Image: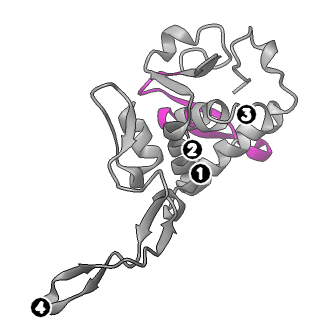
Amino acid sequence: MLGLLNQLCPEGKFDYTWGGRVYSTVPGFCTETIVDTDAYLPGPLFTPVPDELGETVVVPPGWMGSKHTASCECICNAINSSKTFTLHDTGATNCQGTPQAGHSCFIPNEGGADIYIEPGTNFVIPGAGGKGVVPNPDWIALGHELCGHAVDNKFGVWACDVDNSIRHEHGNQWGQRECDSHKGIDPEDEKGCGCDKH
C-alpha cells in the first residue's frame, strides 16, 4: 500500500513508522514550519551569534509546491487528521457486494474509515462524454477511495471530481472518468457501507 501512496504523491516520499502510521520523510512536507528568520547574525570569525529579535516566518507545507497537489494534499490531510484511515490490501475479500467487487471500496466507521484495495488489479471504467473507457489501476482506485471519499467524507459527483483531478495531475494517459453516474447517490443506499457507485 505504501507503494500506491507514493505513486499518488511521489514528492511526499512516504514511509511507515514501526506502529504502522504513514508519514512523509520530507521535513515540512505535510505541515507548515515556523522559521526564525533572525536566529543568528554573523559574528566575529563567522561565529554565529544568537539574535534576540525573534522574527519568524511561516513556511507553507511542502505539498503546496508539489506537482501532484490534489493527491499530496489529501494524503497529508489524512496523516494530520484526528481520524484513523486504515488501508487494507484485501479488496477482493472485503468489497464483495459493492459495485466494484474485487477492486476497491471504503467503509466509514466512528473513528475514520477502512479502505480496501486489491493491489495489482486494473479495471477500466466509463470515460467522460461517453468516449470509451479509461484505465483505473489500483493506485488511482486508492486515490478515489481515500481522497474522493474517506478523508473529507465526500459522496457522489464530488468524489468523481477529485478522482478526475488526480487523473489530470498524473498525465493525459489516465483520461477523465464519467461523473454522471455519481450524481445523487445516497451512501445509505449502498448497504450502509458508504460506498458509492464507482
Residue 133, magenta (yes or no): yes
Q: Is residue 131 visible?
A: no
Residue 1 position in % (x across, y down): 39, 30
Q: Amino acid at mark 2?
A: Cys
15 with respect to 113 (left or right): left
Q: Amino acid at mark 4?
A: Leu
Image position of 166 with respect to 93: above or below: below
Q: Residue at x 61, y 38 (%)?
A: 147
* Residue farthest to the bottom, as pictured: 44
Residue that badge 3 annotates: 154
- Callout 3 touching callout 4 (CB < 8 Å): no
Q: Is residue 77 visible?
A: yes
Q: CA distance from mark 3 to mark 1?
A: 14 Å
Residue 122 position in % (x across, y down): 50, 30
Residue that badge 1 annotates: 70
Label placed on residue 74:
2
The image quarter containing residue 69 is bottom right
Q: Residues within 10 Å of mark 4 (few under 14, many from 20)?
A: few
Which of the two discs, 4 and 2, sits closer to the camera?
4
Q: Read off the magenta span.
A: 115-141
Residue situated in front as seen by the camera: 75 or 45: 45
* Residue farthest to the front, as pictured: 52
Label 4 vs 2, first from the N-terminus: 4
Image position of 126 with respect to 173: above or below: above
Q: Quick one: SS at disc 2?
A: helix
Q: Amino acid at mark 1?
A: Ala
Q: CA distance from mark 4 to mark 2?
A: 47 Å
Residue that badge 4 annotates: 45
Q: Residue at x 52, y 26 (%)?
A: 85
